[in-house]
Amino acid sequence: MAYIDYLVGLDIGTTKICAIIAEITEDAEPKIIGVGTTPSDGLKKGVVVNIEKTVHSIQTAIELAERMAAVEVDSVIVGIAGDHIRSINGRGVVAVAGPDNEISESDVRRVIDAAKAVVLPIDREIIHIIPQEFIVDEQRGIRDPLGMSGVRLETEVHIVTGAVTSAQNIYRSIKRAGLSVQDLVLQPLASSFSVLDEDEKDLGVVVLDLGGGTTDIAMFFDGCIRHTGIVALGGDIVTNDIALCLRTPIDQAEKLKKQYGAALHSEIDTNEQIEVEGVGGRAPRKVAQGLLIDIIHPRMEEILTLAHNEIRKSEFANLMTAGVVLTGGGSLLKGTVELAEQIFDMPVKLGMPKGFGGLVDLASSPIYATAIGLIQYAVSFENEFETDSDDKKGSFRYIWEKMRNWIYGSK
């Protein structure tokens, strides 16, 4: 295995931008050596709306991480999310063309090409093509068909698409920040690398990333991703509700949410009085903490209910035996796990990043799940990052090795 000095995961979110620098040891376990987090300024619901502000936020996060790690970086693995993300499942069928009906790389390439031959609007592009299984002469559940004998080869794939302009603006922002992009990865997919066990992926599990602008969903079963979805609401709308109802500035509303907020009344002594700052120099006033929870609870209930409805759209909804894993900053709100258990009627836990060393204390929080997952994603395809050659990235061997890793998981 080739040795890579450093990898950088860059989580570009609506409320924060997080950069994590990891040193990759010979046993391929990431060792976190730098963490940089800064408020995100220039994005809305995961989409860039102001290039200059986004560039400044990226540069700040990278500089903070570089200073801590005492290294300079020039490329990043980037997460992408937002309400423009859409996913579909595709299916391809071809006749095996090799001698003696032996399935070759050419056959696999042709069946994947057939599966991804879906009609997309001109303003959308494919971000991921993830094989779920191969079928040889109606025999299902095959993960690697190379070398097998058969007449008919089929595959079922999960296709993730995004708006062309949204992806271009992310690339443009990172380039203007003086960096290059090694790969673009769906954020809940990246999070799964840092918070899920292989057993969970096999049994059936949902990753629910509660971000600032959106809530991202990824469903896994039989070791592979089966469904992805987006709810266009996140923690920001909860903060906005607090600001409007209590007539306080947005930044103060965010502090109140983090310090005194909860998704359920049972988590808090609701009679306690808290001080709320006024707008425009108006005098602060006291309100009951229960009032704050009265504002938060219905909005959190709405977000989780919409996520539940999105999960139920999938044919795999009843197979999520392992339950739900919550990540993202919104998952840290008191009572969120308990409220989610009530709504989903299945086990729910907080997704803590794992599988890394170094600055464990600084990065052991659900808010870093995506950034760490991006690094672990890159480690899984370590050999593929030795070059940025477009020829290599477009080659069948590159694509096939990535697909094998999707199927078999991180090695």
Image: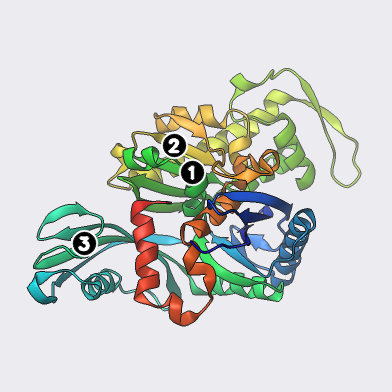
Answer yes or no: do the residues labelled 3 and 1 have beta carbons within 8 Å? no
**Label 3, residues with CA under 10 Å away: few <14, some 14-19, many ≥20:** many
- Total marks in image: 3
Residue topped by disc 1: 208
Q: Quadrant of residue 128?
A: bottom left
Answer yes or no: do the residues labelled 2 and 1 have beta carbons within 8 Å? yes
Q: Which mark is residue 198?
A: none
Q: Earlier in the sequence, mark 2 or mark 1?
A: 1
Label 2 and label 3: CA atoms lie apart by 32 Å
Give how far across and how far down residue 410 sits, in percent. 43, 51
Q: Which mark is residue 324?
A: 2
Task: Name the secondary structure under disc 3.
Answer: loop
Q: Residue at x 41, y 42 (%)?
A: 206
Q: Residue at x 53, y 30 (%)?
A: 337
Query: Going by the image, does 310 lie left or right of 387?
Result: left
Q: In front: 86, or 132? A: 132
Q: In front: 261, or 160? A: 160
Q: Quadrant of residue 405?
A: bottom left
Q: Is residue 103 above or below residue 378?
A: below
Task: Residue type at mark 2: give it.
Answer: Val
Q: Earlier in the sequence, mark 2 or mark 3?
A: 3
